[in-house]
Amino acid sequence: MASDLSPIDKAKFVAAKQASQYVEDGMKVGLGTGSTAAWLVKCLGERVQEEGLKITGIPTSSRTAALAREVGLDVMSLDEARWLDVTIDGADEYDGNLNLIKGGGGSLLQEKIVATASDQMIVIADASKSVETLGSFPLPIEVVPFGWQTTKVLVEETLIGMDVLGRKVTLRMNGEAPFYTDEGNHILDLHLNRIGNARQLSLVMNQIPGVVENGLFIDICDIVVIGHGDGRVEMRDINQGCIAETRIEFVETENLFADLGD
Ligand code: 5RP
């Protein structure tokens, strides 16, 4: 039930609900990964069922693909879709220029490929994800398993010359075993505390052999939809330079609130 949601979950829900209104009939929509993106998928499923909206979802993870099918969305691979109208996804941090850290859920590679292949990227988040400077959230980088310990040393050595406050690098675990992404890679989490030059760091990290991609999304996001626990939603559009605000009512529908497990 909506009344059982924590303020953070309410914030995620209203951001997702508002962002679902950007989707129009016939669109190819990139579907992000994570708890906020899961609300988006449910909201789109509801629009498909109630309004007969015809859309195709391009999921950024196996988790999202399963949920999208569950709620009745048509699902297509990126290779089939080629180019998308919009991608809507969560984020771990966003700054004033709508640059992001993503990958907390381990799907940064597909997320970046799909977002980059879209006319527009919309981020949905609660207000706690807003930061002055990126870097409090550990920066995930996806590395191939072959020689990952050597790659880790190269990353640590490279960080010595970078404008960051912390330099600890950890291998992401899944219980006792290393975490594997959908692409069969590992994730290194870079505990940097503060990233002075995110654009430069992103370019430099991707030069290291063994690094597949990093979780910095620079100049990719167009709009951030920020939810609050009281139902308020702010929309910041980086291209139009405007901020708008609205309010979403918590109307409990069976489709949306049947399963709060994700
Ligand atoms: C997954 C991501 C997520 O979008 C990010 O971790 C935010 O997740 P949540 O919406 O659960 O807070 O980048 O790789």
Image: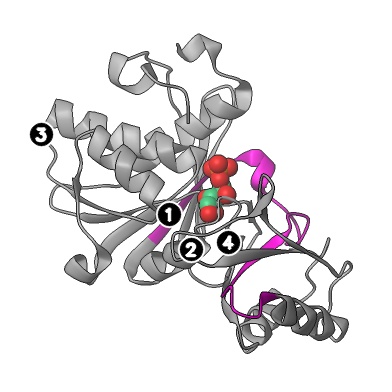
Picture coordinates of residue 178, whole percent (x, y) = 64, 57
Expressed as whole percent of the image width and height from the top left, the position of residue 203 reads: 63, 85
Residue 84: percent from the left, percent from the top? 26, 64
Determine if the C-beta at disc 1 is less than 8 A from ligand 1: no
Inter-mark Cα distance, 3 to 2: 28 Å
Can you name the residue that lies furthest to the front here?
Answer: 176
Which residue is tagged 2?
221
- From the viewer's side, name the closer residue of 252 and 222: 252
CA–CA distance between discs 3 and 1? 23 Å
The number of numbered discs placed on residues in the rendered structure image is: 4
Report, in whole angstroms, how far the alpha carbon at label 2 lies from the one at label 4: 6 Å
Q: Secondary structure at mark 4?
A: loop
Q: Is 225 on the left-hand or right-hand side of 229?
A: left
- Residues at marks 1 and 4 touching, judged by CB atoms closer than 8 Å: no
> What number is the disc on residue 52?
3
Q: Secondary structure at mark 3?
A: loop
Of the residues under marks 3 and 2, which one precedes in the sequence?
3
Quick one: label 1, few (<14), some, or many (20+) residues within 10 Å?
A: many
| Residues at marks 2 and 4 touching, judged by CB atoms closer than 8 Å | yes
Q: How far apart are labels 2 and 1 at the CA level?
A: 6 Å
Circle nearer the N terminus (1, 4): 4
State whether label 3 is within 8 Å of ligand 1: no
Q: Which mark is residue 62?
A: none
Residue denoted by label 4: 98
Identify the image quadrant of the N terminus: top left
Of callouts 2 and 4, the N-terminal one: 4
At label 2, the amino acid type is: Cys
Question: Magenta part of the protein: which range?
Answer: 121-148
Does the magenta run of residues contain 100? no
On whether residue 140 falls in the magenta region, the answer is yes
- Residue 110: x, y in percent? 42, 64
As drawn, 156 above or below 130: below
